[in-house]
Image (cartoon, grey):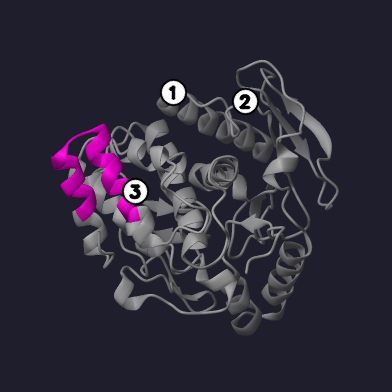
Amino acid sequence: MHETRARRRGIVPPHMLERLKTHADSGLRRCAETTQALDEGLLAVEPSEAAALPRRAAGLERTLYDANHTQRLPGTPMRGEGDAPVADREVNEGYDDLGATYRFYADVFDRDSIDDAGMPLDGSVHYGRDYMNAFWNGREMVFGDGDGRIFKPFTRSLNVVAHELTHGVTGATIDLVYEGQSGALNESISDVFGAMTEQYANDETAAQASWLIGAELLTEAVQGRALRDMAQPGTAYDDDQLGQDPQPADMAHYVDTRQDNGGVHINSGIPNRAFYLAATALSGHSWVVAGHIWYAALTDSRLARDTDFAGFAAVTTALAEERFDSTTRDAVRKAWQAVGVDV
């Protein structure tokens, strides 16, 4: 039913690029078409292939490269682990974001890198020209510079980097099928851990956090706040060129579509809001209770690769009681029920 080799996952949803191709001026259309062609032409490294990559001793190890506006990866080495900052802002931002994501997983979940086996964290900046995306390809993070009119350079947003790296974590654990509800869960898990990484770096509680994904990416010319709003799906942007945020906030508005692998970037708003509701109901820092439940679910034997929203809700609700208590269970259950997923 699904492709045996997954398409590369980028942070910018296909529906945004499609909208720009039909409603933007010729310059932006060209950027969107080029980005879409690159996104559709390359495949992600499979988890089994990633497992065969070289390993080293436990600990953080980063290398940032400059792709020099080409599609040849990784590019020219610019900054290695422990090196001083360089003159290139995007190199330094990518270096910092990779480090912040590593520290979040290490400090909170005792996980040593993406695969929990010391995988080096590499990144390439300045990929292509006017490339409107960033992605994790199974080997490294790759960052476009954006077009400057809609999108800024993609190193600007920590939660976007953590989102993409979390695709690697998911691939190394349950590797959820990237289609339909399991694919939307895959995207949602990346948003959830991306948001928590930023909150951890800023020492924000669930109540203090913005719950916006990619807030730093949109230029001032865009009528919008972010790529997605986990607290209020469907409200992140409403712009003449980008259109209106299509994410549903509950199952009553679930979008049935064949586009985007069955709407994986659209319907992810439903489990996103469930996590937001659970984390805020449990109060304090999101990663302390809700985050541990969601992380435990990734390695729980009750979760299958094709798990749907109801299946994931059942596992997280059960884990809430098993790892914490009935009060936590009730909070998680109510969060899922609030978005129309029965538990």
Q: Residue tagged by mark 1?
A: 107
Q: Main secondary structure of the magenta part?
A: helix
Residue 170 painted magenta: no
Closer to the camera: disc 1 or disc 2? Answer: 2
Residue 303 visible in this rendered orientation of the protein: yes
Closer to the camera: disc 1 or disc 3? Answer: 3
Q: Of residues 121 and 326, which is closer to you in this image?
A: 326
Identify the residue shown where x is 46% and y is 23%: 110
Q: Which mark is residue 315?
A: 3
Asked whether the residues under the numbered discs 1 and 2 touch, taking CB atoms below 8 Å apart as contact, a structural biologist would say no
- 288 over 124 or under it: above or below: above
Label 1 crowd (10 A; few <14 / some 14-19 / many >=20): few
Q: Marks 1/3: CA distance?
A: 24 Å
Asked whether the residues under the numbered discs 1 and 3 touch, taking CB atoms below 8 Å apart as contact, a structural biologist would say no
Magenta-colored span: 313-333
Q: Residue tagged by mark 2?
A: 117
Q: Secondary structure at mark 3?
A: helix
Which label's residue is closer to the chain start, 1 or 2?
Answer: 1
Identify the residue shown where x is 71% and y is 74%: 27
In the rendered view, does 230 fall on the left or right side of 318? right
In the image, what residue type sits under mark 3? Val
Q: Position of residue 285 (x, y in %)?
A: 28, 35
Residue farthest left in this picture:
327
Label 2 crowd (10 A; few <14 / some 14-19 / many >=20): some
